[in-house]
Image: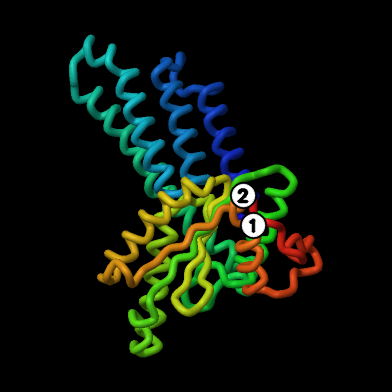
């Protein structure tokens, strides 16, 4: 099962649960702040499923703030009693668990499904997507842009060979895997990360213009540099946008998998001119 289908399924089930809780309330009358809380909890759940831990955390914090504001009249009327405090803490804890823990769980499920669907799409050591998957994703991005002008950007993050060339193979694999895991947790769930070999990682950012990708690249590069304790120049990042750098993205796709699979239109058969 592809993660997009799984995401649609769980969000639909979440919506059904919220609808059932509203239509069949446990109390005789469902107070409007609790109705708002149910909707906010669903939005947090959907954000965690779509964007992962980072997006889920942001929506969880915003939802918690909105919920507290809906309870201001109750606090003004009754004060911060044990019952009121307990209800507030329970709701805030629910937002945190769904947004943060749920987002992390969904991120792991995404790559677990990729392993179940076929390990040929995952790199053996880093457990992120491999060259073949990256090439197909880039070709698909070019096709989407040609048809619908859908923005798409990639970031090629490279580690200096000096960082891992002299390490034993097991240490190399551990370092490369830890960097892959860090990158995966620092990007949105809707984004993908692949390993191209030789210390090169590819961040694939759908619906992202080049300017937005440059911001993400600076953040991820700094995080990786701090993770492994490297000098600034030892971790580099190159940003490409499909609107500005279509030829370069096609060249990268062909270098990863020269021949497009039969089921894909080889939009890179003849490299398009750069915009």
Q: Is residue 91 above or below residue 160?
A: above
Category of crowding for the residue at label 2, using alpha-carbon neighbours closer than 10 angstroms: few (below 14), some (14–19), many (at least 20): some
Category of crowding for the residue at label 1, using alpha-carbon neighbours closer than 10 angstroms: few (below 14), some (14–19), many (at least 20): many
Residue 24 showing in the rendered view: yes
In-image side of 193 versus 255 (left or right)? left
Given residues 130 and 101, the one toward you in this image is 130
| Kind of element beneath mark 1 | helix
Given residues 1 and 83, the one toward you in this image is 1
Residue under the point 31% across and 18% down: 71
Residue 109 showing in the rendered view: no
Where residue 262 appears, as percent x and y from the top left, is 81, 68
Q: What mark, if any, has residue 243 been given in the picture?
A: 2
Q: Is residue 58 above or below residue 134?
A: above
| Kind of element beneath mark 2 | loop
- Which residue ends up furthest to the top in the rendered image? 77
Q: Is residue 145 above or below residue 66?
A: below
In terms of image quadrants, where is residue 87? top left
Residue under the point 47% across and 55% down: 107
Where residue 102 appears, as percent x and y from the top left, is 43, 48
- Which residue ends up furthest to the right in the rendered image? 262
- For the residues bearing labels 2 and 1, Cβ distance under 8 angstroms: yes
In terms of image quadrants, where is residue 237? bottom left
Given residues 135 and 190, the one toward you in this image is 135
List the residue tagged with mark 1: 246
Tell me how far mark 2 sits from mark 1, CA to CA.
6 Å
Where residue 117 appears, as percent x and y from the top left, is 64, 66
Residue under the point 57% across and 45% down: 207
Where residue 137 appears, as percent x and y from the top left, is 64, 60
Residue under the point 44% across and 66% down: 157
In-image side of 182 versus 115 (left or right)? left
Q: How many marks?
A: 2
């Amino acid at each position: 099962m592809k993660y997009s289908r799984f995401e649609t399924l769980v969000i639909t089930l979440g919506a059904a649960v919220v609808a059932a809780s509203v239509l069949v309330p446990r109390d005789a009358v469902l107070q409007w702040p609790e109705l708002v809380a149910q909707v906010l909890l669903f939005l947090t759940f959907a954000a965690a499923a779509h964007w992962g831990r980072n997006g889920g955390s942001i929506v969880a914090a915003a939802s918690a703030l909105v919920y507290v504001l809906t309870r201001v009249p109750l606090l003004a009327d009754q004060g911060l009693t044990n019952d009121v405090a307990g209800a507030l803490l329970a709701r805030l804890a629910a937002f945190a668990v769904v947004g943060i823990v749920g987002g992390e769980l969904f991120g792991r499920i995404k790559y677990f499904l990729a392993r179940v669907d076929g390990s040929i799409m995952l790199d053996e050591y880093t457990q992120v997507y491999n060259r073949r998957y990256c090439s197909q994703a880039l070709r698909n991005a070019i096709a989407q842009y040609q048809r619908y002008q859908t923005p798409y950007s990639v970031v090629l993050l490279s580690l200096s060979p000096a960082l891992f060339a002299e390490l034993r193979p097991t240490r190399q694999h551990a370092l490369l895997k830890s960097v892959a895991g860090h990158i995966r947790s620092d990007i949105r769930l809707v984004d993908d990360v692949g390993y191209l070999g030789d210390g090169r990682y590819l961040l694939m950012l759908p619906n992202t213009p080049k300017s937005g990708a440059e911001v993400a690249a600076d953040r991820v590069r700094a995080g990786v540099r701090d993770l492994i304790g490297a000098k600034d120049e030892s971790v580099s990042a190159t940003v490409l946008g499909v609107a500005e750098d279509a030829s370069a993205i096609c060249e990268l796709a062909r270098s990863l998998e020269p021949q497009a699979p039969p089921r894909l239109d080889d939009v890179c058969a003849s490299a398009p001119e750069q915009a």
